[in-house]
Image (tube, coloured by chain):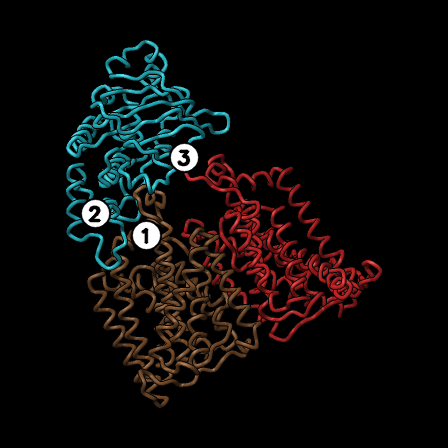
Amino acid sequence: MSEVLLQATGLRLAFGGVKAADGIDLGVMKGEFLAIIGPNGAGKTTFINMTTGYLRPNAGEISYEGQRITGMSPRAIVKRGIARSFQLPQLFLEHTVEQNVALAVASRDGIWSPLTPLLRPGYRDEARDLLERFGLTGIAETRADALNEGARKLADIAMAVALKPRLLLMDEPTSGVAASEKMDVVETLARVLRDAKVTAVFVEHDMDVVERFADRVAVWSQGRIAALGPPGEVLSDPAVQREVIGIERHA
Amino acid sequence: MRKIEPLLAILLAGAMIAAAIAAPWLRFVLTIALAKGIAVMGILLLLRAGQVSFGHALYIAFGAYTVAFLAPRFGDAMILLPLAAVGAGALGLVIGLFVTRYRQIFFGMLNLAMSMVFYSLLEKLYAITKGSDGIRVEIMPVAGQALDRITYEWTIFGIALGLAFVLGLLLRLYLASPMGEALAGIKTRETRLEFMGVPARGVLLSAYVMSAVLGGIGGALIAMTSRHVTPLLAYWTSSGELVFIAILGGAGGVLGPFLGAAGYELVRVYAAASFADAWQMILGAVLLLVILFAPGGLWGMAARAIGGRGR
Amino acid sequence: MAEWFQDNGLLLGLALLDGLSSAGLIFLVAVGLNLVFGVLRIVNVAHGSLYAIGAYAAASIGIFLAGLGLPDWASIPTLILSAALVGAILGPLIERFLLRRIYAQEEVVQLLVTFALFMILEDVQKLVWGVQPIHHETAMKWLGTIDVPFGADFIPFTNYQLFVLPGFAIITLVGLAWFLRRTLTGRVIVAVTTDREAATAMGIDAAKIFLLTFTFGAMLAALGGALSSPTAALVPGIGAQTIVLSFAVVATAGLGQIEGAALTSLMMGLGRSVAVYFEPELEVVVPYIIMVLVLLVRPQGLFGVTETRRV
């Protein structure tokens, strides 16, 4: 648990006058589930965007497995084993769920084979297996644009997992999932990730989810890490409760 | 529907052969239709990625002029066809490197611009291209065999049909492959591709080059059939015609382009014969009717008639 | 250099004057296309046909009225009224019965619907006005010529081309900028252009704005045509030529940019007429070269704004 997988040092990024990251130092340990919580607009998604190469920090650097990845393209970063899922699911809307996941599986090998089908046994079996683990077998052949929000979210995460990352960044994995299914979904997700030995960072608003699944919690407030530690410790801190959780629980 | 596609292809080919035997002038029309169908498969590829090229007549014209220029030197269809294909592919790579940086309307307009530049060069460089008079293409030997006119026309028809079959089959495989499905992914979620480690632009560029090759082959066949090439082949209205055929045929299967091309050429010939001054108007009206009342195109109509789904 | 100028200075001066007047025409047409695209999100391929019909209608109305004894001075108002008439009739017809049906459709379908319309209007124009050149130059003759001082020399040039054409372009530019920024309807149009969803969510009557914008765009195209009619004989095909040039202007300027379209029209008008006098082979190519160069450096057009994708 003590080995650092991802290390952000002195990250800064501002949009106009808004400081989304104002000197962020954050290390992610190998094998842990790290939750990032904080008010909306605090810059949590920005952290994921910077780590995956979609945004470039104004200053500071991110290193992964000891190598600097700041300034690399999203493509290069994926190749190094960092995948992400999205707050607004990014699915190929005219493809079925199975095709979506199979494309992610195929993209590990490069998608350059032009004459053999995408749904060849190798890719199809792996996609089916993954869908089963996510409980999505029933909608494997549904087109992505016909899914409800919860299923879309899961399919989006399944695509990220299909890339076999060593680090997975998830942007609000449970938003849009019906409250009654939430714990089941997270349970499933946690099991899949533990089985695959994936380190996970997730932005989350539901404190019950955080309490139950996070090994550590980082509180992101106004572009800074206001607190960092085990959920029991951080979530009981009165300042954190006032600033973050109080708002979230009653929102 | 997908399962019986090969059967339909054979039926369509049979119908074309029968028609070509029954009426010699149809042989000419259908050869042109096959050639355009091959080129329209290239449009179909790009439509898969949600991109419309309003300039692909450039590659048809390039293929056609390749044949016209080189026929006196390498006067054999079996040499000229690959030359046209490779040349168009190379040109497609150069232009593609530029235009695949753009999407949607910019992509369409840049292709249009490229084709118009080519058109102008063909028209203005009279010393080389004979301007709008165009260049005549003589009957050429095929695979070393000197042929009389009738045999030559049959042979080109046969080559066009054979190529349509082989290329259609390859395209069908491609569209269902990871590469082809990633291409379709550009239409709906290009950014996701990048986050999966797939270079979206590379995928689009490779499809663009393929579409240029298909255009070059189609153009070469057109030159060998009509035996006269003019700059009009590259004019933007010819590019519009290709997109027209793609939509008329329906974007579902690889048979669409050929159904569309055959339908288009037949309507055009009949309209031109019956209403010499208004054939364009009739084609336009047909296009409007198809778009407004038969959104799946001819392919969609065929699919409904057979009772399957369009895709 | 100095020697070159001695020999070619007058020619260059003439080219600049010519360029200025043609830039005025290009702007009128392109700004209408741009406006329509900004609001309706449809690239109207038939925009050039409206230009052509505006030109033909103005010429034949002018000829007809001259036959009734219309005084020469009235020929300029006649041009404008003819254009307004064409736009007011065809604009609402096209928007109501054609475009309104396809706003929800894919881009390629929209493009093709206007392409079909283009094909139909091309033939309508041939059926109504025939294929013989039509020329009615009273408006230009009546205004006479002027000797434009150029260094030690004078260049004779028509007042019409020097003042009327650029004048209308400037009036349109200023009037449009004022209208879009200072009037309620104008601001609504801008709002729809920038964010359609938000604008309609705020209760803006999109149907009315679309109708209004399209009709106005049609009038501008027809005005461009009408104003061009005294300067050259009208032949079939002017619509097809005009539209590709306008595409180039719109793509180069950036979508939805009014002032950008003005500057781009000027660049292309001047570039083209300089080419006409010095390298006539390049005339048609120049606008596209400008376009490609601009888009290489600024992919969103000279004045275009990049749309950021949100993830």
Image marks 2 and 3: residues in contact by CB distance under 8 Å: no
**Are the residues flagged by discs 1 and 2 in contact, CB closer than 8 Å?**
no
For the N terminus of chain A, give its image quadrant: top left
Q: Write down the residue under mark 2.
A: A141
SS label for mark 1:
helix
Labels 1, 2: front one: 1
Q: Nearer the viewer, residue C124 or A205?
A: A205
Which amino acid type is shown beneath numbered disc 1?
Answer: Ala
**Chain B, chosen colour in render:** brown
Q: Can residue B285 be seen in this view?
A: no
Q: Residue at x 67, y 58 (%)?
A: C270
Give the structural element (helix, strand or loop) at label 3: loop
Residue A201, percent from left and from top? 27, 28
Subunit of mark 3? A
Tell me where residue B180 appears, x and y as whole percent.
29, 55
Crowdedness near tag 2: few (<14), some (14–19) or many (≥20) residues, C-alpha within 10 Å: few
Q: Which mark is residue A55?
A: 3
Q: Mark 1 points at which residue?
A: B184
Rendered hue of chain C is red
Q: Colour of chain A?
A: cyan
